[in-house]
Image (cartoon, coloured by chain):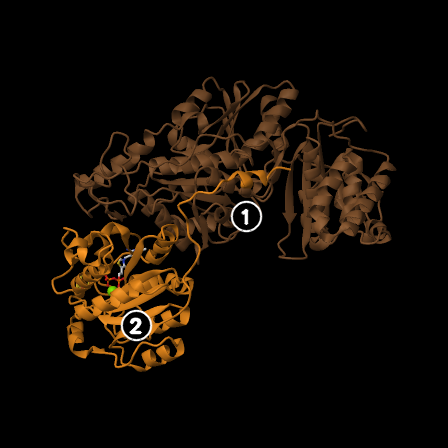
């Protein structure tokens, strides 16, 4: 990233590191929020160690003049409050050549792994400077250093700091200001800076939201009234968001004793007529499998969000992977048609979850949303997500006194009107046993076939519309990906475009049922396809191949976690290929 | 609602039970429908939830809303239903395998959570549906193909576990005593919070010895107590055949519930604005 010194940048990345209690993440959050106040975009990712408390922590932040969805490969600025346990995470945040490392000389030597990259190092006695200021804190000095280097105004920072610290008293706010000013003054003395280009003022307020919160809000927009929860990293924030949010609108969240319980709670609530959701990660999804089959067979609408992490088993709970595709699509026992979708960005977690609620309700079927840690725990500055008309709406049986009610009646679209408990004449028993149209248990060949056909057809006939995925750019070379890998792939396409290489991006939001026709159309004329996914075994590639052929000149680029596949790596794949 | 408006038959469906002739569960079904008639709520305002087993077949034999779910998870499903629809009367019907083995953890937490519903376990001390394997309540020396010579394991004590876990109402009945069972079920439903009724219900096919139960059960000679320690001591020292209401607690039922009014999400949206 050899940007000429001091020329305004379109994007700048920085990392603030320190031990758990040093406030690195708070510092990064303050900078990000203040950046939003001046109209910039950006993403913040926390890197926390395996220790529950007191381990290493880092805020990785990228700010930019246009919406940014993923991190860059390396960082322009790294501020180290201290270097304790640095070896464990320093690989997460390489500093670009031409980048700057700022460290407290009293906190020990800068690790060789960083200086080797040919970066500049500046000293700042963060600890001593903070001590000079009554009530001063090192992380606020770090805020000032970064702000000075990127050209973020003290006014925007003080808006954020005042709001955050006001209840601690004016003295604390003042100490914050002094620290930031001290940091800014220090930065002014350095030989380089990384000013981010100002953007025109806009009256729209930016939103600051994580993928997990966006899932929660998407659920609420879609009409969810009930959630059940068993905590698991990295999905817990969905549940922690929903607990007070649901309570505030007359809904409820119940903490369950395990995922076997949480999935059944939402099935029960949905049977009662309330749109319902739960969120979990791979191990929890595995536990829910039997009951997902029940929801498919008994035709109960539910949404299960899987915020994927590195597997199998406990894996690396705090890092991302896309490796639950197989279990989400193929893990159900028996033939159990259902829907699997994946958000394409942090902001899209909102839309995709709302769409999932809409589909679950419309189709009376389980819908699995495959988010992941890289989306769920990233915090982004975005414009307010547009309202969409997807409000979960069930085909409800209204009750006709003179007619007997067939819960699983065969209909043209495969969806049968559902009676909600309390409705006179609608009494039926929802059943996982093969049943007749009335719901009566049956082991007849015709009932098994009719009901299975019906459950297949209702999904096959559904109008998924153009939400199946995203197609961007043109060219005979296609990067084909899904879910969270869309951000890095999109960025790779932009990088390649700047080099004069036209590459098309095709990304799938709809994973199952597989959008064969739409994807076939998007790939028409493609001569080369690079299939990109964050899995060890190429689950996405195999999933595509189960449904359709790809051009002979197709390559796979896939890798397990914990390191996210980045735009540079994807671009390199294309460059290497093109030069053959 | 007029309590005399309904008869037991109004709560029965036209589906013929698959049970073996003489199965105790027929009597339980009778007691349930009689109790519901006495309670006088409309069948459509009652939900009967179950898991898997011979006993768990009951929902479809009633004329209420029913849910025949997966093995062992009925309490969780019912809790979700009741929290989201507090207006319904929720009955959960289970067996000793369904409720105490595969569903054991949910049993503990349902007692703790104290959601206002009634849990009926038809205890035949055997897995009937899978044709005769020992359950958690089976005697340790009961011989079977799967555990020849017996499991050698101590039988589980559901009533004491319910008490220790916080159930708010604990009773034991015998399926053959329809009048007493009906009365206890009515009280269980009317009691706030989580009510647990164990009904000894013979499996005539795999436990023919249980036909003797009609001669060995006897009514508890004491009044129900509201002191769980006292109730537990009584239950642990009786012969396991004592029937009646053994404990009536005063814990407040689980509070959270979904209301019909939907609040405005605008403030939640605004919270993300900076
Ligand atoms: C996950 C799962 N495991 C095993 C079974 C097989 N199964 C069906 S019923 C049953 C035991 C039922 O025993 P109990 O609850 O005592 O009911 P009963 O038939 O005695 O009334 C078992 C093991 C199943 N249906 N699902
Ligand atoms: S097997 Fe036993 S429990 Fe099952 S129906 Fe027959 S008698 Fe009843
Ligand atoms: Mg049994």
Q: Between residue A111 and residue B103, name the one nearer to us.
A: B103
User: On the image, which quarter does residue A572 sit in?
Assistant: top right
Please give the label number shown on residue B151: 2
The brown one among the chains is: A
Quadrant the N terminus of chain A occupies: top right
Residue A530: x, y in percent?
Answer: 52, 28
In this rendering, position of residue B137 left or right of residue A444? right
Q: Which of the four quarters of the rendered structure image does ligand 3 lie in?
A: bottom left
Q: Is residue B144 above or below residue B40?
A: below
Residue A350: x, y in percent?
Answer: 51, 36
Please give the label number shown on residue A383: none
Q: Between residue A442 and residue B9, name the one nearer to us.
A: B9
Q: Chain of mark 2?
A: B
Residue A316: x, y in percent?
Answer: 56, 50
In this rendering, position of residue A569 left or right of residue A479? right
C-alpha gap between disc 1 and disc 2: 44 Å
The orange one among the chains is: B
- What residue would you read off at disc 1? A237
């Amino acid at each position: 990233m050899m940007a000429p010194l001091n020329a305004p940048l379109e994007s700048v990345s920085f990392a603030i590191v320190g031990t758990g209690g040093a406030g690195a993440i708070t510092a990064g959050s303050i900078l990000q929020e203040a950046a939003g106040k001046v109209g910039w975009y950006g993403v913040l990712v926390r890197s926390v160690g395996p220790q529950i408390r007191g381990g290493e922590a880092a805020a990785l932040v990228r700010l930019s003049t246009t919406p940014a969805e993923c991190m860059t490969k390396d960082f322009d600025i790294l501020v180290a409050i201290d270097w304790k346990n640095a070896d464990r995470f320093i690989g997460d945040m390489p500093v670009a050549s031409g980048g700057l490392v700022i460290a407290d000389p009293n906190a020990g030597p800068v690790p060789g792994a960083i200086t080797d990259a040919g970066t500049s190092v500046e000293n700042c006695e963060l600890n001593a400077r903070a001590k000079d200021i009554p009530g001063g804190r090192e992380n606020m000095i770090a805020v000032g250093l970064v702000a000075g280097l990127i050209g973020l105004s003290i006014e925007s920072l003080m808006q954020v700091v005042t709001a955050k610290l006001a209840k601690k008293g004016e003295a604390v706010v003042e100490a914050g200001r002094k620290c930031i000013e001290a940091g800014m003054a220090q930065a002014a003395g350095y030989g380089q800076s990384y000013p981010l280009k100002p953007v025109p003022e806009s009256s729209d307020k930016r939103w600051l939201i994580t993928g997990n919160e966006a899932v929660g809000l998407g659920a609420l927009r879609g009409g969810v009234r009930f959630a059940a929860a068993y905590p698991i990293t990295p999905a817990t924030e969905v549940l922690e968001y929903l607990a007070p949010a649901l309570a505030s609108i007359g809904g409820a969240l119940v903490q369950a004793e395990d995922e076997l319980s949480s999935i059944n709670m939402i099935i029960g609530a949905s049977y009662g007529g309330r749109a319902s959701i739960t969120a979990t990660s791979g191990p929890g999804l595995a536990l829910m499998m039997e009951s997902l089959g029940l929801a498919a067979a008994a035709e109960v609408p539910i949404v299960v969000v899987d915020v994927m992490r590195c597997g199998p088993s406990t894996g690396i709970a705090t890092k991302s992977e896309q490796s639950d595709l197989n279990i989400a699509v193929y893990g159900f026992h028996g033939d159990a048609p259902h829907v699997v979708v994946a958000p394409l960005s942090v902001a899209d977690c909102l839309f995709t979850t709302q769409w999932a609620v809409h589909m679950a309700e419309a189709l009376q079927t389980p819908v699995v949303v495959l988010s992941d840690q890289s989306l769920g725990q990233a915090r982004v500055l975005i414009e307010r997500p547009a309202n969409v008309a997807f409000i979960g709406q069930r085909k409800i049986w209204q009750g006709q006194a003179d007619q007997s009610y067939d819960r699983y009646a065969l209909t043209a679209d495969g969806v049968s009107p559902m009676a909600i408990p309390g409705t006179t004449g609608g009494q039926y028993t929802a059943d996982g046993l093969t049943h007749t149209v009335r719901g009566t248990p049956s082991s007849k060949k015709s009932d098994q076939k009719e009901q299975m056909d019906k459950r297949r057809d209702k999904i096959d006939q559904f109008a998924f519309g153009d939400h199946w995925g995203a197609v961007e750019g043109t060219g005979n070379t296609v990067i084909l990906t899904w879910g969270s890998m869309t951000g890095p792939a999109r960025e790779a396409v932009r990088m390649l475009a700047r080099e004069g290489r036209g590459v098309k991006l095709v990304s799938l939001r709809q994973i199952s049922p597989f959008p064969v026709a739409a994807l076939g159309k998007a790939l028409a004329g493609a001569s080369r396809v690079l299939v990109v996914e964050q899995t060890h075994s190429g689950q996405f590639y195999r999933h595509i191949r189960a449904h359709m052929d790809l051009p002979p000149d197709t390559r796979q680029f896939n890798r397990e976690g914990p390191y996210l596949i980045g735009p540079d790596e994807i671009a390199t794949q294309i460059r290497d290929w093109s030069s053959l | 609602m007029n309590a005399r408006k309904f008869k037991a038959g109004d709560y029965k469906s036209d589906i013929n039970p698959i049970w073996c002739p003489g199965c105790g569960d027929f009597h339980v079904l009778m007691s349930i429908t009689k109790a519901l008639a006495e309670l006088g709520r409309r069948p459509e305002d009652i939900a009967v939830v179950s898991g898997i087993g011979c006993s768990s077949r009951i929902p479809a034999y009633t004329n209420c809303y029913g849910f025949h779910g997966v093995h062992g998870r009925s309490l969780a499903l019912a809790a979700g239903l009741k929290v989201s629809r507090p207006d319904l009367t929720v009955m959960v019907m289970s067996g000793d395998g369904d409720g105490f083995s595969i569903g054991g953890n949910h049993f503990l937490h349902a007692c703790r959570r104290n959601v206002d519903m009634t849990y009926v376990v038809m205890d035949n001390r055997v897995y009937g549906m899978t044709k005769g394997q020992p359950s958690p309540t089976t005697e340790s020396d009961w011989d079977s193909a799967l555990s020849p010579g017996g499991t050698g394991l101590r039988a589980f004590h559901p009533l004491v576990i319910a008490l220790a876990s916080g159930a708010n109402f604990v009773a034991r009945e015998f399926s053959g005593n329809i009048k007493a069972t009906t009365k206890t079920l009515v009280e269980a439903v009317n009691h706030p919070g989580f009510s647990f009724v164990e009904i000894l219900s013979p499996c005539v096919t795999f436990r023919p010895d249980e036909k003797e139960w009609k001669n060995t059960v006897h009514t508890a000679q004491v009044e129900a107590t509201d002191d769980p320690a006292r109730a537990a001591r009584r239950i642990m020292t009786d012969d396991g055949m004592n029937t009646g209401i053994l404990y009536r607690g005063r814990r407040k039922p689980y509070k959270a519930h979904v209301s019909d009014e939907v609040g405005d999400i605008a403030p939640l949206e605004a919270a993300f604005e900076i």
